[in-house]
Amino acid sequence: MSTLPLSPAAIALNRFGLGVRPGDALPDDPKHWLHAQFDRFDEKPAVFAALADAGALLQNYQDQQRAARQMVPVTLPHPPAAPTLSAIPRPAGLQPPTASGAAPSPNAMRAAIRQDFGQDAQALYRAAIQARMQSALQTDAPFVERMVHFWSNHFCVSADNTQTTAFVGAFERDAIRPHVLGRFEDMLIAVEQHPAMLIYLNQINSAGPNSPFALGVARRNPAKRPGLNENLGREIMELHTLGVRSGYSQTDVTEFSRALTGWSVGGALAGGRRDATSPDTFFFRAPLHEPGTRTIVGKTYDQPDDGQARAALVDFAAAPATATHVATKLARHFAGDAPPPALVARLAASYTRHRGSLPELYRTLIASPEPWVRTPQKFKTPWEWTVSALRGLGRTDLGQMQVAGMLGQLGQPVWKPGSPAGYDDIAASWAAPDALLRRVELAQRLVAPIGDRLDARDLGPRLIPASFSPATADQVGKAESPGAALALLLVSPDFLRR
Amino acid sequence: MLLPRRRFLSFAALGAGAFWVSPRMALAAVETERRFVFIIQRGAADGLNIVSPYADPAYASLRGALAIDPAKAIKLDGTFALHPSLVQIGQMYAQHQALFVHAVASPYRDRSHFDGQHVLETGGTAPYQVGDGWLNRLVAMLPRARDEAIAFASTVPMALRGAADVTSYAPSALPQPSDDLLLRVGQLYAGDGQLGPLWNAALAARGLAGGASARQDPASLGKLAAGFLAKPQGPRIAMIETGGWDTHTGQDGRLSAQLKALDMMVAALRDGLGPVWAQTTVLVATEFGRTAAANGTGGTDHGTGSAAMLIGGAVRGGRVVADWPGLSAANLYENRDLRPTAGLDAVIAGAAAEGLGLDPDQVGRRLFAQGGGRPVTGLVT
């Protein structure tokens, strides 16, 4: 197959950026074009500011549940001893039916409130996904916007339960976006203190086994003594910072998890009481904190309260293992599925030298030769492909298009990888038979509203500047209709890769 | 309460509050009448509550409120009982079509899901030591009926990635592209080393699927898999991915729902396969087990030893295979987990070989060259 080497402009726009829009001017100096985006990145675009407030949604739900509970005695099992945001014993579908004409039972009422909350959370999740795509289409800083998506996947929360579903858009907006041009350490702390993460990885349920709270419960009922949940502690070390197999032990995980006890969110307390805090803010619950000094990866932490885990996080952020972990993922994202060791080493050195400064890290990346290799290095993920396709077709607003459903069909539901490891960033995870057919199906649907308003023969060389392959140009020129030609362009080898 | 957190893609169930995670399937076609299905439980399934050692004196105290009540469970023998949600699988056990291997583990001994799954799927002894999947190498050991094999899901799981062609299929809700577009895409990909083979495989899988239902619930997926496997020209090896087993909190309800879904899927697979069930071996396995003791939040944390299942008409079932290490404090692995006394690799090698009529030692060497140990034979007829 005849192909042309990719032009530096094509690499800047497609590999570093999110894809060309038909009206975009070609950058004369691709590296300068990337650097200049640091100054014009919009941290809080209007589309995000307009989203409903997840904390208010949750607060409203908790208030309603409390009201329902107080109205009539509840026959359901007691909520678990540790504070949880809500005690939801079983799915709504399993509630006993109400006899016709009778007043709704307390259980039925609570189920209805829960169902409403579930629908509100879904609506908010879908609206946030629309906002994310809207921002990706409209941004003038597509490289920085790509880095938002990158970090959001690195520190991922997955919308697998109702509360995380409600918060996941706010997580990216409030914990990732403000720090994408800041320091890794600050992003790390914002991420680990965000309600979405504290809920998703069960931190709000974890209690120090010797904390005042646990001892108090144990005095009343020794069988119900609350204790540790290692989930967040382990994934911070394994996925967010040091990286797996970097030398820490199970004891380190347990010790760090003890240090984290008390990290929680505001709002509802066990027993239905409520304090002045809000469920969408970090809140340290001192009675849950395991007392004492901790030893984590050979270092002693004797700070009081939430300062203990915070100090460990600061050390994790500064650790050489974290520099290598972050550098490896960044290199893989831009220079190929098997990241070049020289690039990884250079990025890690930059990370360490500049104390986790992300703009410096990006500068090192842009200045390196490896991400500028003139053959495609990456097979686009479904998200990347959809963003670039909509940009390529000149969409600036989404209209009736539902992004959540589209990405679900393509096999990459937004903010829902089903695991705290996030989505894979290698071709083997995305280039598969059925996945290709899905893209062809969706391409046909995306071009349907365009008709003949765009000529694929002109568009091709604009989307892949100075490097559009003659073979693709040939097939596009022979398609049976303007729409078929556009769809073909979107699923061409040139456009599937970056 | 928190719902399962490790889920896999669920296109149809997007937003549906279902406990069960839409499983994904991958299939491979080979020249044999026997069928082998691997169901992976991603997230570390709790073997100690799935096949509970009710006779072990330490079990009830370690698990406290989480312990499975033996009176409600399905008694398997004098030591073990099956989780009450596994009704149909319990019946298969009674009909000698299901067996359980307990205190089993892959060679992996740390507690990362992602590394653990990589070891389980590749057959290495350490993460990222082996670059392809053991199920793919198994496909390569069989005489091929055609050039390509098939995958059921948009993408191909690690265990099936490798040199042998494997395609993928999952029901799509998107409109069918025009014939002209399909034709031109085919021409465009023909010269592309990566896209060309994937495209041909995709079209073949769509052809084989015919008018399969697009439903994603466990019973429909079992039926869909059976539909592919029962076809004379269809694939002989299948992989089904399930997620949602990582029960750090609220384990009781979640594990029950997960197991009920598994039970429905296996039953639908059996019913859909009809007479072919007699030649079928289904392996159910997870990357590692969970802590022997309950944690402080109504769940369990990452552990080591777990339980695996072999189910099917070809299985010599009706027994629990275990060299039980005991759950007393002195016997726990690293003072917290069920100590593994059986190698999962050896179980897989034996079951896959006998399930497909291959030589166990040869299969063991090919699939787990790094030290799977001697294959466990006699599990499948």
Image (cartoon, coloured by chain):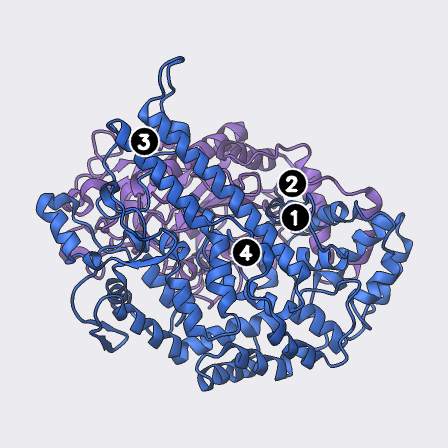
Chain colours: A blue, B purple
Residue at which label 4 appears: A49
Which of disc 4 and disc 3 is earlier in sequence? 4
Label 3, secondary structure: give it: helix
Q: Is B375 in front, or is A147? A: A147
Residue farthest to the top?
Answer: A101
Q: Is B361 in front, or is A109? A: A109
Q: Are marks 2 and 1 in contact (CB under 8 Å)?
A: yes
- Residue B9 horizontal/vertical position (percent): 53, 47
Residue at which label 2 appears: B172
Q: Amino acid at mark 1?
A: Asp
Q: Say which of marks 2 and 3 sits in front.
A: 3
Res A135 seen here = yes
Distance, label 1 to label 4, CA atoms, is: 37 Å
Distance, label 3 to label 1, CA atoms, is: 48 Å
Distance, label 2 to label 1, CA atoms, is: 9 Å
Q: Say which of marks 2 and 1 sits in front.
A: 2
Which of disc 1 and disc 3 is earlier in sequence? 3
Point out which mark residue A434 bears: 1
Image label count: 4
Label 4, secondary structure: give it: helix
Residue at which label 3 appears: A68
Q: Amino acid at mark 2?
A: Ser
